[in-house]
Amino acid sequence: MKFLFLIFLCSLNLCHTEGSGSAVTFPGYKVVRFVPQNQEDVEAAKKMEENPGILVLRQAGSVNQSMDVAIPPHMQTDFMSAARKQMPSSIMTENLESLIDRESMQLAMDESSSSTQTFEAVFTQYMPLEAVNQFIIQLQNLHPDMVNVSTYGKSVEGRELQMVKIEREGGSENKHIMLMDGTTHAREWISTMQTIYFMNELCEQDTPEVNKILDNFVVFVVPVVNPDGVDPNRNFDFGFGGIGSSDDPCSEVYHGPFPLSAPETQALSEVISSLKPMLYLCMHSYSQMMLHSYGCSQPGEINEREAEHVKYFISRSMLPIY
Ligand SMILES: *[C@@H]1O[C@H](CO)[C@@H](O)[C@H](O)[C@H]1NC(C)=O
Ligand SMILES: *[C@@H]1O[C@H](CO)[C@@H](O)[C@H](O)[C@H]1NC(C)=O
Ligand SMILES: [Zn+2]
C-alpha cells in the first residue's frame, strides 16, 4: 500500500473553516489515531496531513509516535479505510461534535450559575484571557506581600504579556528561580488552568509541599505565553528550523520567518535570559506525556542521567494521583 489515499478529495470543501464569527462545527467527524511503524508510514502520515479535508490534532512525528486526525464524514469511507490499511490505527472518538456539544452545554450551565460558583469549580473549565488577568490581579490584591504581577512585553496584537512573581519571606538564603508557563498553544486550555491552579495553591496553602517550594524557590509564572493565538512554539532561537518544524506559513508547525520573529518569543526569551531559572516547566496539554530537556535534541546532546533522575521523581510523585 503506497500513498494512494493521500490525494483523494483534496478539493472538497472544509466544514471546519467557516467565516469568522460563526461557531466552528465538526458534524460527524471521527478522530482516528495512526501509529507509523516504519519510515514509509511516517512519510505517508505526513502526506495525509497535507490533505485539506482533514483536521490534524496531533502531527505525525517519527516511528511509533502517533498522529491524531479528525476525519469528516465524506472521507470516512475511502480515505479513512485506505489510511487505516497503511498502518495500525484506532478510533479515538466516534463523534467529535457530540463531545464539543457536551462541553459547550457544561460551559453554558456554569455561566448561568456563576453567581453561586465556588472558586474551585473554575479550575476545571476554560478561562478567557480577561478572567486570567483578573485572577492574577486578585491574587496580588489578596497577597500583596507575596505576589507581584508585571508586564514583560506586548503580543503581536498589542495585548500585555503578564508574569506573576510569587515569593515568600524567609526560607533558604539563596533561593533558586523557578519559571512555569502555560498557554503556548491556544487550544491547550487546561495548561492555562494548571498555572492558575498552581499559583492559587502556592498562595492559599500552607502544606509541606508548598513550603518546600517557597522555602527554596522564587517562583515566576506566565499563565498565557500566547494571548492572541499565534503559535510561538517553534519560533525560539534554540534549534530553530529543526525537526518537527516547517518553513511553510500554512503549516501547523510553521516556525516563522526567523528566530524570535514573534514579539511573544522575543519577550519570553529575554525573561528567561535574565532570570536564568534553575527549573523551567512549560505546561502543554496534548497527550499524557512528560518531555524533558529539548524536544528538538537527540539523545546524547543533553545530560540524560540528570534528566532521567528528575523524570523519575516527577513521575513517581504523580503516579498516586493520576
Ligand atoms: C517501536 O516500537 C516497537 C515495539 O515497542 C519497538 O520494537 C521498536 O524498536 C520501536 N521503534 C522505534 C524507532 O522507536
Ligand atoms: C512589583 O515589582 C516591580 C519591580 O520589581 C515594582 O516596581 C512594583 O512596585 C511591584 N509591585 C507591587 C504591587 O509590589
Ligand atoms: Zn502545546
Image: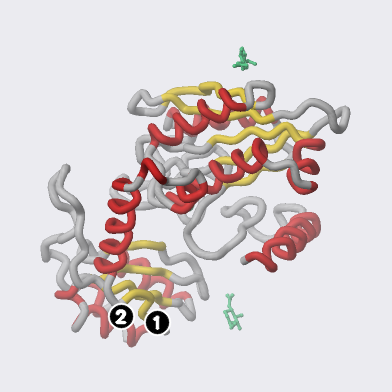
Disc 2 element: helix
Image quadrant containing the N terminus: bottom left
- How far separated are the C-alphas under marks 1 and 2? 9 Å
Is residue 147 something that shows in the picture? yes
Front residue of this view, candidates 210 and 255: 210
- In this rendering, the answer to whether 158 lies above or below 301 is above
- Say which amino acid is labelled 1: Ser
Query: In x, y percent, where is residue 51?
Result: 24, 65
Q: Which residue is mark 2?
A: 83
Front residue of this view, candidates 309 and 141: 141
Query: In x, y percent, where is residue 259?
Result: 48, 35
**Residue at 35% in and 52% down:** 252
Left or right for 53, reference 129:
left
Query: In x, y percent, where is residue 175?
Result: 81, 31
Few, some or many residues within 10 Å of mark 1 (<14, 14–19, 20+)? some
Q: How is the image coloured?
A: secondary structure
Q: Earlier in the sequence, mark 1 or mark 2?
A: 2
Query: In x, y percent, where is residue 194?
Result: 54, 48
Q: Nearer the viewer, mark 1 or mark 2?
A: 1
Residue 211 lies in quadrant: top right
Q: Check if mark 1's residue and mark 2's residue have beta carbons within 8 Å.
A: yes
Residue 196 lies in quadrant: top right
**Residue at 50% in and 68% down:** 62
Disc 1 element: strand
Badge number at residue 89: 1
Image quadrant containing the C terminus: bottom right
